Amino acid sequence: MKQQIIVSGIGGQGVLFLTRVIAQVAVNRGIPVLTSETHGMAQRGGTVLSTIKIGNFASPLIRAGQADIGLLLWDANLPVHKGLLKENGKLFISAEQTGEGERIDAAGIARLIGNPVLSNLVLLGFAVKRQALFCTSEECEKAIRQLAPQKFVEQNLEAFKQGLNG
């Protein structure tokens, strides 16, 4: 099992938490996992890129044209990070409008739940439902329970389940 995943967004969207959830699933399965983050100006709403490599890899960085999956929390990052995807790579984007890749208004759903930051888990559920990632919904739910602060676990799980229904 090998999979290369990019997670792209802007500061405050939960890119790093989403990365940790996916990595935790791999750890729970006993699969080697490498992650890397580029924060840049994230504190000021700038771009955040995270890479996740599931399986036996020597480096956490993903070269152009090598990612199997792209999870984009901000569709404006598409021109910047699309080049990292393989020609047949799958792209999941949080966006209100139609366009390239499979899209869901994850931010809108998260706002309805009452916490806009949860768009990351809505997008994760959306990708998991489409069987794009190496993991199951049950494995993701377990990882969310392990990583989310106790007082936010149920809200996090609700966001993930909304994505599964999307």
Image: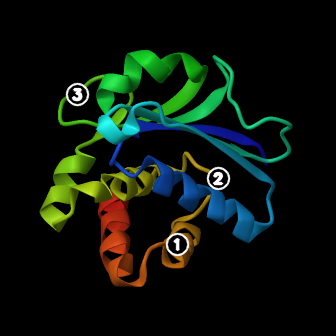
Q: Are marks 1 and 2 in contact (CB under 8 Å)?
A: no
Q: CA distance from mark 1 to mark 3?
A: 32 Å
Horizontal side of 60 relative to 142 (left or right) equals right
The nearer-to-camera label among 1 and 3 is 1
At horizontal 86% and vertical 37% (from top left) the residue drawn is 58
Q: Earlier in the sequence, mark 2 or mark 3?
A: 3
Q: Is disc 2 surrounded by few (<14), some (14 to 19) or many (20+) residues within 10 Å?
A: few
Q: Quadrant of the C terminus?
A: bottom left
Q: Mark 1 or mark 3, which has the lower sequence index?
A: 3
Please tell me how crowded label 1 is: few (under 14), some (14-19), or many (20+) other residues with Cα within 10 Å: few
Question: Percent position (x, y) of residue 43?
Answer: 35, 41
Residue type at the position of mark 2: Phe
Element at label 3: loop
Q: In the rendering, which numbered label is found on residue 147?
A: 1
Left or right, 123 with respect to 145, comes to: left
- Structural distance between the alpha carbons of marks 2 and 3: 26 Å
> In terms of image quadrants, where is residue 84?
top right
Q: Image check: 148 left or right of 5?
A: left
User: In this rendering, is residue 150 above or below 93?
Assistant: below
Residue placed under numbered mark 3 in the picture: 98
Residue in the picture at 39% in, 78% down: 153
The coloring applied to the image is: rainbow
Q: Is residue 33 visible?
A: yes
- Residue named by callout 2: 134
Cα separation between marks 1 and 2: 19 Å
